[in-house]
Amino acid sequence: MRRVAKLSAACIASAALALTATACGSTSSEEDSSSSTTDGGKGVKIGIAFDVGGRGDRSFNDSAARGADKAKEEFGGEIKELTAKSSDTEADREQRLSDLADAGYNPIVGVGFAYAASIGKVSAKYPKVSFGIIDSVVDAKNVNSITFTEEQGSYLAGVAAALKTKKNHVGFVGGVDTPLIKKFEAGYAQGVKDTKPGVKVDVQYLSRGTDLSGFSSPDKGKEAASGMLDNGADVVYAAAGSSGNGAIEAVNGVKGAWAIGVDSDQYNIPGLAKYKSSILTSMVKNVDVGVYDFVKSVHDGKPLTGVNNYSLAKDGVSLATSGGFIDDIKPQLDAAKKKIVDGTIKVKTTP
Amino acid sequence: MNKLTARIDKERLLLGLAAPLLALVAAIVVTTLVILATGKNPGAAFSDMLTYGTASDSQVYILNKATTYYLAGVAVAIGFRMNLFNIGVDGQYRLAAFIAAVLGGALTVPGWIAIPLIILCAMATGALWAAIAGILKVTRGVSEVISTIMLNSIATAVIAYLLQPGKLAELQSGGTVVSTTPLPKDSYFFSIDTGPAGELWGFIVIAALVGVAYWFVLGRTRFGFDLRTVGQSESAAAASGVSVKKMVATSMIISGAVAGLIGMPTLLNDSHQFSNDFPAGIGFTGIAIALLGRNHPVGIALGALLWGFLERTTNHLEFEGYDKEILGVIQGVIVLCVVIAYEVVRRYGLKRQQQRVGAELAAQAAAPTEKQEVA
């Protein structure tokens, strides 16, 4: 009987705890709802649905975040950020976008191609809200499709890698073998071959198919880059979201080896400051420009729609020069850029 | 004697309910502490979960999610009932959904023929994939835990190889999503339109039927009895004339066939194609749900609903400014608490039983001596 008493006492105590927790909840939730009705008014209410990794991935999502931050600084207002989980289903993404639309956020930006289908559905439900989708195309009247010519920027990264390698051996670490990341690989490989045909290019993807973990596993990135370095490569280009941080770390451990960053100018990312002496350059994808332009257009009352392709010609993609490590090869890079812009070089989008 | 069995049954029922309740309460307490540690108000979080989670559109979302999770839970539970850890449900359902999507995209027959064909194809694929592990176990003694984990990776690789433009898939506009050929409109499974709340997937009917079949086969047939016997003691089952090897292979195949259904609600009711963003990892969710539901058809349903509820409401918690990692914490804590609570309650029940038997024996032994003394 004593055990029963003990057990029931434990039950009652924990239930009581839980009850007190919910009891004090009802009042504070009222406060919550009243405060949320009073805010807003001035400026733009930007809703951002990030891809896996979210703000702080030092790469793709951060770039989008910078664009939104800049817009907020200029136009005032607020930013609401939600972040994808790797176990997301379509319903979760739709919920995220609908929650933002319901709360009056406009514009709403879906960062990453994973949001393509859900933006298609949600944009139809909220015809008065402007949606932006990055890295994909959604055909709807109130959607701005923001795309980039990653292969062109990666071509330049390939040129830089070919000119900087001493062992005639370079590597490419891709996050997931999606068509998007293959554009990076294709451009990079072509850039290397066009500059120095004898250079060997190692390619490795961190995860494949439906397994998107390769975009958010720095450990896998580190392992893959270490493998390439052990194999004799001395320049590694990582297009792998936050997994790229691991690749950069691995390269930093080898003297004379270079890493090429992606999406953001990773030389200037505080979290990577320890390794910046190894970051040759970064293939910057100006997602921030795309996001900023979109928010600005909504703020001005003329929302962008249709497909807006940010190409090398429009500086949508570029090589970062921070650190000055590629200053000596600037003429070759400029020449390559000119050839791509005027169409002499056609960069492939598939390897 | 009758009175005694009635009391034991009542007590067993109470104990059965005590475990999940204890687990839930403990999980709530731990979650409260975690939210407090992040400097937020847990009360507001719980009340937001309640109000948001009971809204009509949330109900539809939860039921749709639970449909998928229920099938996953049952697929895992079939293995659990016979002491088989089918960790490979994840790979089985992904491969099954992929192959079924390819077939569905290629079929041009009317929907009433195509839909059953797609579902059967998925079940067959799941069963075949699981059969590999089953056969390895009975012929070579390979642990199904190891082989199914490996088969998961192989399934991922097979899908990645075939899901390429030019093989069994096509590139969609925008150049970022690869998918199989979309199913024709005729092959969409029916869904129930609930107005502004969204669409309730019709596949919930199939999930319910699977639940009934699971209950019937395991609880009311010779096969189910054999299966449970093997699960409890292989040697006892063999002694009573059950072929253990045959049972292992069969139950693995059935588990795989049900696993094949997991992707079907998504494929037939929602995405209508298999693309590189098809939900992954549901097989592992199924393990948690089967544990939570104690392999019981109703328990698994409750577990699946709870999971759907948690996902729905924690998504919204992120919107309210709480950390999105809360979901993982709550789910992990619940599973841990469930496992611990079941063990605690089981041991407690065992002790009670021993005490009662002891008391009875003591009473029996005491009775004659008393009489002797009187005499």
Image: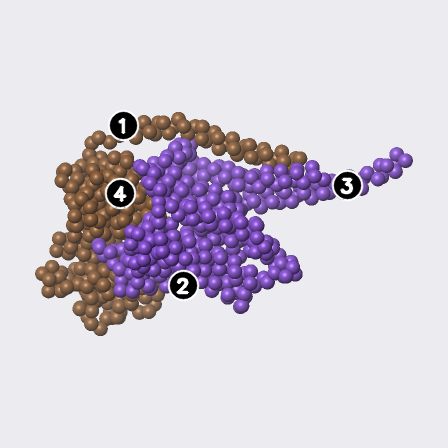
Chain colours: A brown, B purple
To which residue does mark 4 refer? A122
* Labelled pair 2, 3 in contact (Cβ < 8 Å): no
Disc 4 element: helix
Q: Amino acid at mark 1?
A: Thr
Residue A284: which numbered mark, if any? none
Q: Residue at 50% across / 65% down in the picture?
A: B135
Q: Residues within 10 Å of mark 2 (few under 14, many from 20)?
A: some
Q: Are marks 2 and 1 in contact (CB under 8 Å)?
A: no
Circle 3/circle 1 CB separation < 8 Å: no
Where in the figure is residue B65, as x and y percent of width and height?
A: 39, 45
Q: Is residue A71 visible to us here?
A: yes
Q: Is residue A206 visible?
A: no
> Which numbered tag is attached to residue A38?
1
Residue B181 lies in what quarter of the image? bottom left
In the displayed orientation, state which residue is furthest to the bottom: A198
Q: Say which chain tag 1 marks.
A: A
